[in-house]
Amino acid sequence: MTAELIDGNALAARTRADVARRVQALKARGVTPGLAVILVGEDPASQVYVRHKVKDSEEAGLNSVLERHPATLSEAELLARIEALNRDPAIHGILVQLPLPRHIDAARVIESISPAKDVDGFHVASAGALMTGQPGFWPCTPYGCMKMLDSIGYELRGKHAVVIGRSNIVGKPMAMMLLARSATVTICHSATQDLGALTRQADVVVAAVGKRNVLTADMVKPGAVIIDVGMNRNDEGKLCGDVDFETVRQVAGWITPVPGGVGPMTRAMLLVNTLEAAERS
Ligand SMILES: NC(=O)C1=CN([C@@H]2O[C@H](COP(=O)(O)OP(=O)(O)OC[C@H]3O[C@@H](n4cnc5c(N)ncnc54)[C@H](OP(=O)(O)O)[C@@H]3O)[C@@H](O)[C@H]2O)C=CC1
Ligand SMILES: Nc1nc(=O)c2c([nH]1)NC[C@@H]1CN(c3ccc(C(=O)N[C@@H](CCC(=O)O)C(=O)O)cc3)C=[N+]21
Ligand SMILES: [Mg+2]
């Protein structure tokens, strides 16, 4: 048996095309969705990511503004920039690329973004809305994972979903989204004992750790759905996920690749959130 691939590139392309159509409809009403992307410092990976985000949004017809600041930017200066963007009616979404330089308190910066413009879904108000089932922006990575599950028509109700990782931007919101669909959810982390005993019971595994080969074939129930959020480099410098893809695909029912899986969907959901921020404005 070989797992079916859940093609993130193809689903992201369809999602972007749908966003582009809705952007045209909004423009006809005189509103162009505007996204501000703030990059502080020169981290090479972050530079690649933000360039991707700006290119994606321009291709979908959004207006994106990239603000680059030196790593020496003070926290007060950054907060002042966000305050100005919060008031700018042409800007509907604000994304501050993480990680930030160590002298800046990332939590404070995120909480300074207006929840109405929090298209990353990282604000405590967004997290609270997700947890309580109220309207608000969902973090793009777990939101994209949900869209991947929907794309295969997967019924989560009553299924056991195991999320590996408990970060505020991936693991915890992922668990909340699965729970909202009436999956039974287990959240694992670095102190979890016998991870394999838990994942072997799982109908769905979401791996969001940041370490290669966290999930191997012996840890997977035959036919399970495997969503790989991890972004790592192997010894040859090639991008790879948290899942031992070649062996796990022999056991799983569905699996997302890296690259070409969750990453492109994360970027597509940022466009969806920004469009919806503009539609609500
Ligand atoms: N595809 C995409 O669009 C995105 C990909 N990523 C990638 O996803 C991965 C996770 O990101 P993020 O959530 O920010 O990472 P964090 O480093 O914030 O969190 C990692 C989590 O993994 C847990 N963990 C660490 N080691 C183990 C282990 N051996 N077994 C079980 N759990 C473990 C940690 O546990 P503890 O809490 O106990 O420390 C923590 O909860 C990274 O590779 C990142 O690059 C992230 C965002 C977007
Ligand atoms: N405020 C903020 N919001 C984020 O959403 C955010 C962030 N900061 N900091 C960094 C992480 C990481 N992240 C990725 C998104 C897409 C890909 C992606 O598109 N990956 C491609 C490959 C890209 C490549 O070739 O390098 C893929 O998996 O196919 C990767 C990583 C968003 N993040
Ligand atoms: Mg982190």
Image: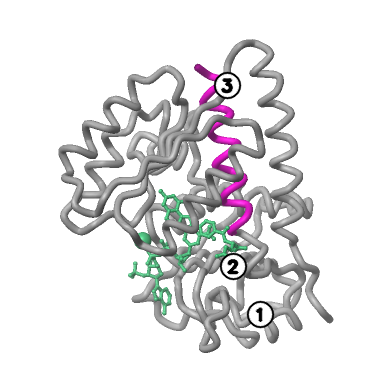
Instruction: Characterize the local packing of mark 1: few (<14), some (14-19) or many (20 or more) Cα atoms within 10 angstroms.
Output: many
Q: Residue 267 colored magenta?
A: yes
Percent x, y of residue 275: 58, 29
Q: Residue 219 colored magenta?
A: no
Q: Which residue is mark 1?
A: 245
Residue at 50%, 41% in the rendered image: 138
Q: Which residue is mark 2?
A: 228
If you read the primary sequence from the N terminus, does the residue marked by circle 3 or circle 1 appear first? 3
If you read the primary sequence from the N terminus, does the residue marked by circle 2 or circle 3 appear first? 3
**How far is the residue under mark 3 from the one under mark 1?**
41 Å
Mark 2 lies on a secondary structure that is strand
Residue farthest to the top, as pictured? 29
Amino acid type at image mark 1: Phe
Left or right relative to 258: residue 186: left
Amino acid type at image mark 3: Thr
Mark identifier at residue 32? 3
Residue range in magenta is 263-281
Residue 118's place in the image compared with 177, above or below, is above
Mark 2 and 1 residues: CB-CB less than 8 Å, in contact?
yes
Viewer-proximal residue, 105 or 55? 55
Pointer 2 residue Cβ closer than 8 Å to ligand 1: no
Q: State the quadrant of the N terminus.
A: bottom right
Residue at 77%, 71% in the rendered image: 253
Front of the two marks 3 and 1: 3
Mark 1 lies on a secondary structure that is helix
Mark identifier at residue 87? none
